[in-house]
Image: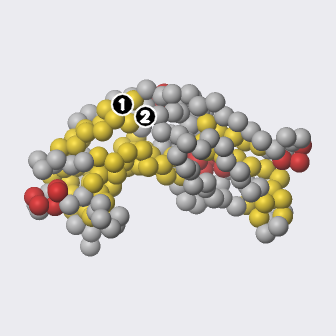
Amino acid sequence: MTGDFGGFGSFVRTKPNLHGYVIDASRENKPANTLKIIVYCPGYGIELLNLTSLSDLSDMSSSVELKPLPTVHLSGKIVTTDEDALRDFKMEVIYFAYWGHEFFGIADGIVTAIKLASADVKQDGSFSVALLDFSRDPAIAPFMEKGVIGLRARDPKTGNFAYKLESAERPGIDAEFEIAAKYNELLLYAKPYK
């Protein structure tokens, strides 16, 4: 949101079975003039709200109609020199929505990240997960950058990163893949954090 206070960004913690949220459209006791919101709900496409003049609104409420998205399958295998490690983490699947910068009109800042799923990794290193097919999401079609799917290894007990996952095709680079309607079988390396 923007106003006499400058610009400010935040998020709303969602709760199960709650379908309406109140957003404080002010900062430092100063009302916001504009408000932009990215709405994500598991199973549905992204919805965008762009309220360009809050002072012109007689009713300060807005609603969105969620539209389901089809799913796409992501699977692969993780290779590590520490075979016991594969039992010590869960793979987290995150959508990094780089188009959020264009939507919010900022050049730099925190990238909008949406946790999509968590996948168990079998003892042989294989994993499989169904994801929303954001390549078919009409809300993000107009943006230049569509975003990437990132895979992260987290310790289920602490929530800390357990290993750095890298694509076998791009060693040394985090396991991140352009959103697509289909993913080839992935080969990933799990390396300890230094």
Residue, x 63% and y 58% (percent of image)?
A: 10
Q: Is residue 128 above or below residue 182?
A: below
Residue, x 67% and y 48% (percent of image)?
A: 21
| Label 1: element kind | strand
Residue, x 48% and y 43% (percent of image)?
A: 147
Residue, x 89% and y 48% (percent of image)?
A: 55
Please indicate whether residue 62 sits to the left or right of residue 126 in the image.
right
Q: Quadrant of the C terminus?
A: bottom left
Please indicate whether residue 186 sits to the left or right of residue 181 in the image.
left
Q: Which mark is residue 132?
A: 2
N-terminal-most mark, 1 or 2: 1
Query: Please, which colouring scheme is shown?
Result: secondary structure
Q: List x then y, in percent, for residue 182.
A: 34, 29
Q: CA distance from mark 1 to mark 2?
A: 6 Å
Q: Residues within 10 Å of mark 1 (few under 14, many from 20)?
A: some
Q: Nearer the viewer, residue 13 or 50?
A: 13
Q: Which residue is mark 1?
A: 72
Q: List x then y, in percent, for residue 165.
A: 27, 56
